[in-house]
């Protein structure tokens, strides 16, 4: 079972280049999950106990605004990460994640992974090298979206 | 991987005295979005241009504005421009009706290096109205599809309602030999497409960064991020081309309004190789 999960984790592009012992540590916190179209991976304010690496399908990250319903501010696809709030206290989701179509993903137990990061700083550093660039990319993307660069120049 | 600058594109010269307009008659004026219109003109005697070039369009009694050509270079009898109404001249142009006349000076400037992309993968990244000056290059590439490797068109805009040339994007997407990805900055839950900035699409497309040419047009901030994404994917500076926008008046490099560092956008651009721009692109003084 663990060997099967290890193979799945090894094949995911997010972990490309990690050495075998690191992949084994990661895969010990992983499981296979699937979500049908319309199903939520998680909801805003829920505990960020499990995050996801998408293997197939697409997920909409949404926030609700009074009178406007759900607004999608990002979609995440195959090979990408859904959820980063598990990295930072208070470990709660700040948006909804909804499957747009059938999604197959690796679910990663956040407590398990954080625990391994705490006890093994080298492993923790290797994980941060994977996740911090995603945080930076999302921050830059958010900046572009907030600037509304496609609007009429004022 | 070659680091030498690719061959410069052809640049047809103005159809007449570069300072004297020729007449063009409006064949069609189509609204594309909230503040965007596409004008199809019938110029006297046809009009040869290269993808990426622009014209000075003269709304009689109001003034001139530099407008990118957005039509098919293979159809010289139909000169197409896509215009955002942002000032007196552009607003006057967008109000013209079929049969009205405008003045045309052009074509001006250096266009997209479509011929230099022959044999290579082509990555086209457009943001918002930036799809308009890239459309002639897309027509040229798709019209001569077997000359190129993989072709990807990435388009980002504000919302689903702001998607430009939507029916053509759909048509291109149905082709089996072109990868088309569209994304918007935000959308309601009934939108099933991508949401996020255009640069997030770069890692999703298949291309060989060592044997590709990229053409990028959009808001300058978006282009800077697009360049960063292309470089992260492994593309050299010499293979990335951007179309710059500055306030143009004379269009022939005399007045200096469009000076951009040591170059004039009207004469030396609007399309520049990124290797020429990298030192000045992020300088706020320029």
Image (spheres, rainbow, N blue to C red):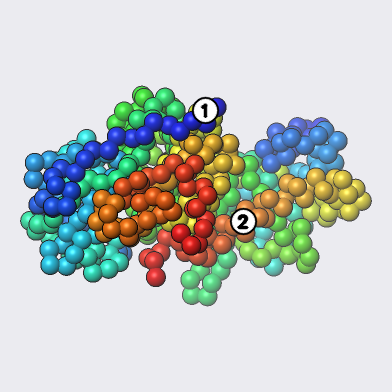
Expressed as whole percent of the image width and height from the top left, the position of residue A128 reads: 77, 50
Lateral position of residue B159 relative to residue A49, left or right: left
Query: Residue at the location (35% across, 45% down)?
Result: B268
Q: Quadrant of the N terminus of chain B?
A: top right
Q: Which chain carries label 1?
A: B
Question: Label 2 belongs to which residue?
Answer: A138
Figure check: A100 above or below B89: above
Residue B110 figure quarter = top left
Question: Label 1 belongs to which residue?
Answer: B2
Q: Tell which residue pokes out farthest to the right in this image.
A: A119
Residue B179 figure quarter = top left
Figure check: A62 above or below B18: below
Expressed as whole percent of the image width and height from the top left, the position of residue B98 reads: 10, 56
Q: Which chain carries label 2?
A: A
* Residue A110 seen from this side: yes
* Residue B157 seen from this side: no
């Amino acid at each position: 079972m663990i060997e099967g999960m290890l193979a799945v984790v090894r094949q995911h592009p997010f972990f490309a280049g990690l050495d075998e012992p690191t992949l084994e540590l990661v895969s010990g916190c992983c499981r296979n999950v699937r979500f049908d179209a319309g199903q939520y991976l998680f909801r805003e304010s829920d505990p960020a106990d499990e995050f996801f690496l998408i293997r197939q399908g697409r997920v909409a990250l949404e926030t609700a605004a009074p009178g406007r319903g759900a607004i999608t501010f990002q979609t995440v696809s195959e090979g990408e990460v859904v959820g980063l709030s598990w990295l930072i206290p208070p470990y709660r989701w700040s948006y909804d994640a909804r499957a747009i179509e059938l999604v197959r993903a690796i679910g990663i137990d956040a407590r398990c992974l954080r625990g391994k990061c705490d006890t093994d700083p080298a492993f923790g550093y290797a994980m941060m090298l994977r996740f911090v660039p995603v945080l930076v990319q999302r921050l830059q993307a958010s900046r572009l979206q907030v600037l509304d660069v496609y609007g009429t120049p004022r | 991987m070659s680091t030498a600058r690719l061959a410069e594109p052809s640049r047809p010269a103005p159809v007449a005295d570069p300072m004297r307009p020729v007449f063009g008659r409006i064949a069609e004026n189509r609204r594309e979005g909230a503040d965007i219109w596409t004008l199809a003109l019938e110029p006297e005697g046809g009009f040869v241009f290269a993808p990426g070039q622009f014209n000075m369009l003269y709304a009689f009694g109001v003034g001139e504005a530099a407008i990118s050509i957005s039509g098919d270079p293979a159809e010289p009898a139909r000169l197409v421009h896509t215009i955002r109404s942002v000032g007196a001249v552009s607003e006057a142009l967008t109000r013209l009706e079929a049969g009205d006349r405008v003045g045309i000076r052009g074509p001006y400037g250096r266009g997209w290096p479509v011929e230099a992309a022959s044999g290579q993968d082509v990555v086209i990244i457009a943001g918002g109205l930036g799809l308009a000056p890239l459309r002639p290059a897309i027509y040229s590439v798709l019209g001569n599809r077997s000359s190129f490797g993989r072709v990807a068109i990435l388009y980002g805009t504000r919302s689903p309602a702001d998607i430009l040339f939507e029916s053509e994007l759909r048509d291109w997407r149905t082709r089996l030999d072109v990868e088309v990805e569209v994304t918007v900055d935000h959308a309601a839950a009934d939108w099933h497409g991508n949401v996020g900035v255009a640069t997030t699409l770069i890692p999703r497309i298949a291309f060989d960064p060592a044997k590709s040419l990229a053409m990028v047009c959009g808001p300058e901030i978006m282009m800077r991020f697009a360049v960063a994404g292309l470089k992260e994917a492994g593309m050299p500076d010499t293979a990335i081309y951007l179309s710059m926008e500055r306030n143009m008046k004379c269009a022939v490099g005399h007045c200096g309004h469009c000076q951009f560092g040591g170059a004039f956008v009207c004469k030396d651009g609007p399309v520049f190789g990124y290797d020429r721009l990298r030192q000045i692109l992020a300088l706020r003084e320029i």
